[in-house]
Amino acid sequence: MTEPLRNAEPRRGRLVRFAPWLTSATGHGAVIAGVISVGAVAVRVAESRPTAAAPVQARWVELPAAAAPQPTASAAPSATNRAPSTPPSFSALSPLPAATGMAPRASQDGAVTPTPTATEGVSFGGITARQARRIAFVLDASGSMVGSFPAVAAQCRRAIESIAPGGEFVVIIFQGGGCRVAAAGKLQPASSEAAKGVADWLISEVRPGGNSDPRPALEQALSFHPDTLFLLANGAAAGRSFGIGRAALLESADKANAKDRFTGQRDCIVNCIECFERDPEGALEALAAAHSGSYRFTSRPDMGLTRQGRIAP
C-alpha cells in the first residue's frame, strides 16, 4: 500500500467518529434558532399593543359662592315665574273621553268600521250575553203565545240589531212537536236589514198554535254551532216540563251540547227566558244552570205587553 492511502484511512475514521456529534449539534442549533424567532415575534406583538392611558387625577376646585340677589319692594314675582304653592293634583287634570264601546277597524276596502269590545253584548229578554258572535234564538210559537208573539218578534229584532259587526245569528221557532228555521235557514250575518226581514217573517209567516216541545228546535239550533243560545218559552207551556218531563229535556240538551271530555266545557252557553208564568218543575232554570247560562223570568209588562196580553202603547 502506498503512503497517501495509509494517511487517508485514519482521516476517514475520524470523520466517521465525529459525524453523530455534528448531526446532533445541527439539530440543537435549529431548535435554538426557532426559539429565538418565536421570542422575537412575541416581543413585536407586545410592542404593537396600545398601552393603557395613565389615570387622570381629579382635583376638586372650590368656586366662590355667588351672592344671592336681594329682592326689592318693587320687584315682586310675576304670575308667569311664580312657583306653585302646591303641586297639581290628578283631579285637576282634564278627564279622559268616555269610552264609546266601539274600536275602529279598517276593512279591506279601506272603510273604517267599529269592532266589538268586551263591554258590548247582545240583550234579549232581559239577559245580556257578552262577546257573543254566533247567536241562536229559539222561540216558543205554541198556542200559549197567541197575542204576545208580535212582542217577541219585536224584541228579537232589537236583539239582532244589537249584534256587533261581524256577528251571525239564526232564529228557530218550535210548535206542535216540530220546528222551523227563519229566513236563510242557517246562520247569517247580522244587520238592520236582516233583523227587519226576520221580524217580518215571524209576524207574517208564523201562526202560534199547538203544544210545546223545544227539543227539536234546540237540537237544530245547536247543530249550527253557536256560541250563545237564547231559549224563550211560556212558563204555562213549560208546565210539567213541556209534557215531556224535566229529565228528558235536560238529557236531550246534554247530548246536543255535550261537554268536552278533556276540559269539561260546552261549546254553547244556553240562556233561558221564562215568560208570563212559571214552570213548577223549573226545567228552564235547570237547563240554563247546566249549560253555564243565565235564567230570567219575564212578565208581560217586561215584554212590552199589557196585562191582557196586548202590545202596550
Image: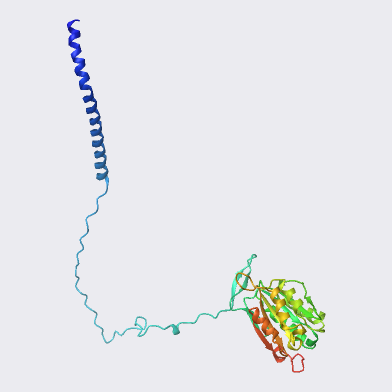
Q: How many discs mark residues in the rendered view? A: 0
The residue sitting at the top extreme is: 2
Q: Residue at x 66, y 81 (%)?
A: 288
Q: Is any part of residue 12 visible from this angle?
A: yes
Residue 139 horizontal/vertical position (percent): 74, 81
Instruction: Name the image colouring.
Output: rainbow
Residue 26 horizontal/vertical position (percent): 24, 27
- Residue 201 or 186: which is nearer the viewer? 186
- Residue 54 or 182: which is nearer the viewer? 182
Residue 151 horizontal/vertical position (percent): 75, 86
Q: If the image is split into quadrants, where does the N terminus sit?
A: top left
Q: If the image is split into quadrants, where does the C terminus sit?
A: bottom right
The answer to whether residue 148 is above or below residue 250 is below
Place residue 246 in its image quadrant.
bottom right
| 77 left or right, relative to 28 | right
Place residue 84 in its image quadrant.
bottom left
The answer to whether residue 21 is above or below residue 104 is above
| 14 left or right, relative to 288 | left
The residue sitting at the bottom extreme is: 307
Residue 213 horizontal/vertical position (percent): 77, 81
Q: Is any part of residue 157 visible from this angle?
A: no
Q: Residue at x 19, y 5 (%)?
A: 2
